[in-house]
């Protein structure tokens, strides 16, 4: 999605703010000779920023305002080593609450709702983000935080909770517990705002069915405010994001070149109005695509597709970038296939080969089916895989994260 003139002028202000603050990114922009951003070409020439840059700035090297303007910090969990510290000004905190309020509004949640918030509070951005947005909306918050299932369910009944804010794994745990205790009819739960982890359609369906609620996926990352920068709507086709706060571009994770709307790549975010820690072209490593055109729900805000994994999952086959989600989408078009699949990439006789294992109920000849799937992949992605059809139940399953892609080229 081409950057608009209004967004360009905001980026220019962010760049000026960074340069005059002399923070890590300001110095880098100065070294790169960037003085202003007026055109899409100026924007495309701006350097990317990475998670590692944020670590290098520990503890407060990201601050782009005088210290007395910082009212809060958050920290991303980080897998190893130095954490990332993000400083927020009062306006940043306010802007984040407004974005989260919009998320609730998009999900049809109002001041009459009672929102039980189960993600964690503290350095993590989750709980407090859910709460600030709910208060801005005027809904009643029930700030539980995670854990203590007994008390969660008691409050859910006694307080007449109508909306559950949770991670997908905790929502599933609660759903199963509600089912086990047979207390569904004592609950007033209508909606779930579910965030942060990547989750399959199956898990989503289970939470939805067991709780009998509508589910909205929330998007966000600590580096860019936190959860609340985007949410799915009733049309359930992608997530709207707030393009007056963020500019999102999708790039080829390998070359860094922007890809056309509708094509998969890595989400790169530029903050447009952030004060405490503005980020220019921050590489999220989340894989998605811009969904072109208007959403059936009528929202004027643009959309990205549900997050389809991490850029580390990208496979390059015969010069074509492929993401597991693309294969998954094609397989979903065949009702006679189960949701299990496995992709194996190998290097045979000097050529890259992709084998896709799929399972079927046996209503169609295996060879016919294999040929149809291979043709569809060829048509959509541009190369012909070897498709192996097996009987239902043959592929391995796991309750947690089933590994589906095996790259055997370098084993
Ligand atoms: Zn929509």
Image: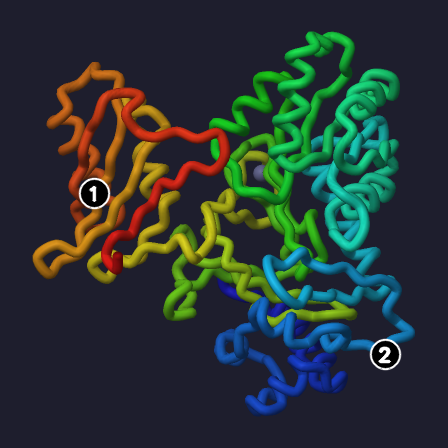
What residue is drawn where x is 60% and y is 38%? 217
Specify the quadrant of the image occupied by residue 29: bottom right
Residue 122 coordinates in the image, percent (x, y): 81, 50
Residue at point 87% right, 37% down?
A: 138
Q: Residue furthest right?
A: 68
Q: Quadrant of residue 211?
A: top right
Q: Is residue 258 above or below residue 308?
A: below
Q: Nearer the viewer, residue 359 or 284?
A: 359
State the image quarter where residue 4 is shown: bottom right
Within the displayed image, which quadrant is ligand 1 positioned in?
top right
How is colour applied across the structure in the image?
rainbow
Residue 240 visible in rendering: yes
The label nearer to you, 2 versus 1, is 1
Q: Would you say 106 lies left or right of 315 here?
A: right
Does dot 2 land on a helix, a strand or a loop? loop
- Tell me the tag on residue 66: 2
Secondary element at image label 1: strand
Residue occupying the point 30% across, 38% down: 342
Q: Which of the image's four quarters has the C terminus? A: bottom left
- Number of marks in picture: 2
- For this rendering, which residue is in front, 389 or 22? 389
Label 1 beta carbon within 8 A of ligand 1: no
Query: Could you give the CA–CA distance between mark 2 and mark 1, rounded to whole angstroms?
Result: 56 Å
User: Residue sitting at 73 percent across and 8 percent down?
Assistant: 185
Mark 1 burial class by Cα count in 10 Å: few <14, some 14-19, many 20+: some
**Residue 146 higher or lower than 223, as above or below:** above
The x, y position of residue 297, in whole percent, is 58, 35
Picture coordinates of residue 195, whole percent (x, y): 64, 40
Earlier in the chain: of badge 2 and badge 1, it is 2
Residue holding disc 1:
355
Depth check, front residue: 245 or 126: 126
**Disc 2 residue crowd, few under 14, some 14–19, many 20+, Cα 10 Å:** few
């Amino acid at each position: 999605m081409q950057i608009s003139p209004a967004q360009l002028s905001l980026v220019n202000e962010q760049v000026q703010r960074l340069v005059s603050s002399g923070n890590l990114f300001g110095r880098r922009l100065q070294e790169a000779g960037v003085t202003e951003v007026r055109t899409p070409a100026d924007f495309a020439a701006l350097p990317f920023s990475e998670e590692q840059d944020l670590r290098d700035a520990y503890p407060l090297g990201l601050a782009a305002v005088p210290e007395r303007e910082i009212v809060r910090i958050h920290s991303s969990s980080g897998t190893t080593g130095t954490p990332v510290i993000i400083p927020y000004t009062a306006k940043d905190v306010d802007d984040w609450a407004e974005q989260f309020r919009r998320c609730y509004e998009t999900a049809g949640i109002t001041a009459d709702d009672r929102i039980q918030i189960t993600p964690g509070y503290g350095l993590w951005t989750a709980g407090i983000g859910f709460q600030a947005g709910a208060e801005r909306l005027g809904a009643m918050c029930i700030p539980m935080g995670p854990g203590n299932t007994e008390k969660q369910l008691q409050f859910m009944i006694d307080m007449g909770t109508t909306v559950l804010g949770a991670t997908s794994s905790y929502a599933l745990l609660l759903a199963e517990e509600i089912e086990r205790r047979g207390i569904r009819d004592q609950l007033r739960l209508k909606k779930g705002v579910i965030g942060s982890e990547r989750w399959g359609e199956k898990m989503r369906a289970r939470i939805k069915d067991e709780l009998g609620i509508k589910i909205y996926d929330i998007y966000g990352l600590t580096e860019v405010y936190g959860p609340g920068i985007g949410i799915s709507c009733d049309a359930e086709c992608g997530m709207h994001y707030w393009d007056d706060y963020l500019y999102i571009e999708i790039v080829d994770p390998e070359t860094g070149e922007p890809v056309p709307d509708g094509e998969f790549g890595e989400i790169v975010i530029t903050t447009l109005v952030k004060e405490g820690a503005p980020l220019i072209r921050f590489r999220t490593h989340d894989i998605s695509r811009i969904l072109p055109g208007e959403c059936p729900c009528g929202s004027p805000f643009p959309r990205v597709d549900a997050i389809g994994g991490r850029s580390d999952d990208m496979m390059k086959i015969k010069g074509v970038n492929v993401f597991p989600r693309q294969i998954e989408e094609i397989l979903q078009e065949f009702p006679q296939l189960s949701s299990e699949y496995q992709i194996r990439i190998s290097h045979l006789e000097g050529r890259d080969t992709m084998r896709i294992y799929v399972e079927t109920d046996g209503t169609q000849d295996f060879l016919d089916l294999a040929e149809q799937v291979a043709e569809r992949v060829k048509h959509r992605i541009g190369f012909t895989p070897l498709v192996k059809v097996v009987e239902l139940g043959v592929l391995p399953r796991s309750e947690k994260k089933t590994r589906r892609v095996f790259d055997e080229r370098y084993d």
